[in-house]
Image (cartoon, grey):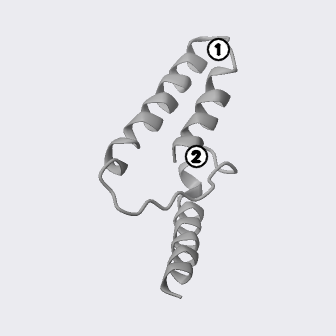
């Protein structure tokens, strides 16, 4: 998870905002990244699907995100149950 956040952080801050809208989007993405760290600190298992092909703001892709999480979770448990 840390490597994913690092990758997103590098991507996020490598682009210099050109206007206030981009500053707000960067702030929103930064907040999302750091808020997602909180619930994972005490977990025994962390499944972190590769979500790099998804947009952080597009809510229409929610069913695809759920499906990706479901598929990766099934694959994870198949590996540890064997």
Residue 82 position in % (x across, y down): 53, 88
Q: Residue at x 56, y 12 (%)?
A: 20
Q: Which residue is mark 2?
A: 58
Residue 58: percent from the left, percent from the top? 58, 46
Contact, mark 1 vs mark 2 (Cβ under 8 Å):
no
Q: Residue at x 42, y 34 (%)?
A: 34
Mark 1: give few (<14), some (14-19) or many (20+) Cα within 10 Å.
some
Q: Is residue 16 above or below residue 54?
A: above
Number of residues whose C-alpha sits closer than 10 Å to that of mark 2, classed few (under 14), some (14–19) or many (20 or more): few
Up-down relation of residue 17 to residue 4 (above or below) = above
Residue 43 pos. (x, y %): 33, 57
Q: Residue at x 29, y 52 (%)?
A: 42
Which residue is located at x 58 percent, y 30 percent? 9
- Work out whether residue 49 or residue 20 is closer to the camera in this orientation and state it: 49
Query: Up-down: is 16 above or below 62?
Result: above
Between the C-alphas of marks 1 and 2, the distance is 20 Å
Decide which of 61, 46 is in the foreground and name it: 46
Q: Secondary structure at mark 2?
A: loop
Q: Which residue is mark 1?
A: 17
């Amino acid at each position: 998870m840390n490597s994913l956040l690092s990758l997103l952080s590098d991507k996020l801050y490598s682009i210099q905002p050109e206007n206030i809208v981009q500053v707000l989007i960067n702030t929103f993405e930064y907040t999302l990244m750091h808020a997602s760290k909180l619930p994972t600190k005490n977990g025994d298992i962390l499944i972190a699907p590769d979500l790099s092909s998804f947009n952080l703001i597009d809510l229409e892709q929610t069913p695809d995100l759920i499906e990706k999480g479901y598929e990766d979770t099934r694959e994870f448990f198949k590996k540890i149950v064997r």
